[in-house]
Amino acid sequence: MLAAALLLAGCGGGGGHEQWAGPPPPAADGSVSIAGFDQAARSPLDTAAAFLRLDQVQAATATLVSRTAAEGGDRATATATFDGLLDDSIRAHRYVLELEQLTDGTWRLRSATFSQRCQPGRGHQDFSPALCV
């Protein structure tokens, strides 16, 4: 597997996403609707950054990692983790995005899931879509 990583301190960069307000709240099972997001970009990382609106992220640490097949397959997974959130119950958010490369070489989002890790003493310490207390 090839891996590319983008480390962000505090908030992400990049503009030009005026039509997309960012991901909607997740369903109870962690699924996130991608309806209304039709942007395709030159890389899985660029597509993920646009969907997540990294220019608006407020976390102490944000990481975005993309994995594709070594032989240049047409599928990729991008995992974004936002840790050190300014919340008394939630410590971190994680999004796992599944992407597909189109025939023109651009990457399009196919699905998104959400999970979170609670602050110590406020619930689960593993990433889960379950609520924190």
Image: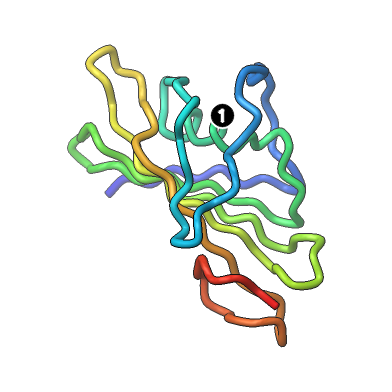
State the colouring used for the structure image: rainbow
From the viewer's perspective, tell me whether residue 102 is left or right of residue 60: left
- Which residue is at the far top? 104
Of residue 131 and residue 60, the one placed in the foreground of this image is 131
| Residue drawn at point x = 44 percent, y = 61 percent | 29
User: Residue 15 falls in which quadrant of the image?
Assistant: top right
Mark 1, other Cα within 10 Å: few <14 / some 14–19 / many ≥20: many
Q: Position of residue 30 (x, y in %)?
A: 47, 58
From the viewer's perspective, tell me whether residue 121 is left or right of residue 76: right
- Which residue is at the far front? 28
Of residue 90 and residue 54, the one placed in the foreground of this image is 90
Q: Position of residue 124 (x, y in %)?
A: 58, 81
- Which residue is at the far bottom? 121
Give the answer, above or below, for where 47 lies relative to 88. above
| Residue drawn at point x = 67 percent, y = 25 percent | 14
Location of the C terminus by quadrant is bottom right
Give the SS element for disc 1.
helix
Residue named by callout 1: 50
| Residue drawn at point x = 73 percent, y = 48 percent | 9
From the viewer's perspective, tell me whether residue 97 is left or right of residue 58: left
| Residue drawn at point x = 44 percent, y = 43 percent | 4
Give the answer, above or below, for where 34 lies relative to 25. above
Across the whole image, how many numbered discs are drawn on residues? 1
Of residue 63 and residue 33, the one placed in the foreground of this image is 33
Of residue 93 and residue 132, the one placed in the foreground of this image is 132
Which amino acid type is shown beneath numbered disc 1?
A: Ala
